[in-house]
Structures are given as C-alpha cells and as structure tokens.
Image (tube, helix red, strand yellow):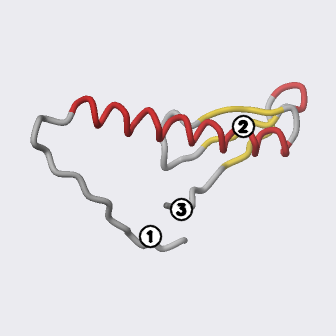
Amino acid sequence: MKHDYHVVYTPVEDGWIMATVPELPGAVTQGRDLGEARKNIKEAVELLLEAYRENARNDAPGGAMWETISIEVPVG
C-alpha cells in the first residue's frame, strides 16, 4: 500500500537538515545534507509505522477483525 506524507526540512546547526513528518508524531530525523535527510526520514517513517502495526496486533483483543481501508486526503 502506498501513502504520501508531507515532510518538512529545516536547517539546523552546523549545516545539518532536520526532517519531520507532521502527520506522524515521532517521525523526526536529520541528515548532513538534504539527500541524507530524505533517506533517513523514509527509514524513520517505515520503522515507526512498523512499530505502530506491531503494537496494534499485540494490543488487539482475541477475535478482533482486521481490514484495510483507503482514504483520499486532499492536499492543501
């Protein structure tokens, strides 16, 4: 499943670039340059979503039903 996220890149100390995803609290990383920040935020989002899914599986009561839904979110 593909989903698009907004990423905010902010210059910080010593030329580093901080990357955050406002829709996903906790998705924060940095890189020495924009390319590295892009690579690192993709990995951070993947790991964060994987952890969310694992926690949801572990916390779900027995007999819970699961399904996937698709939602179109307007960009603006």
Can you say whether 8 is above or below 27 in the image? below
Name the secondary structure under disc 1: loop
Residue at (85% x, 45% y) in the render: 35
Q: Is residue 52 above or below residue 4?
A: above
Q: Position of residue 26 (x, y in %)?
A: 51, 33
| Picture quadrant of residue 27 | top right
Marks 3 and 1 in Cβ contact (< 8 Å) = no
Q: Which residue is mark 2?
A: 40
Query: Callout 2 environment at 10 Å: few (<14), some (14 to 19), or many (20+)?
Result: some
Q: Residue at x 75, y 42 (%)?
A: 39
Q: Which residue is mark 1?
A: 73
- Give the label, 2 or 3, closer to the camera: 3
Instruction: Look at 54% across and 71% down and name the residue there.
Output: 75
Horizontally, residue 63 falls left or right of residue 26, namely: left
Q: Amino acid at mark 1?
A: Val
Q: Amino acid at mark 3?
A: Lys
SS at mark 2? helix
The image position of residue 69, as x and y in percent, is 32, 64
Is 71 or 7 nearer to us in this picture?
A: 71
Q: Which mark is residue 2?
A: 3
Give the label, 3 or 1, closer to the camera: 3
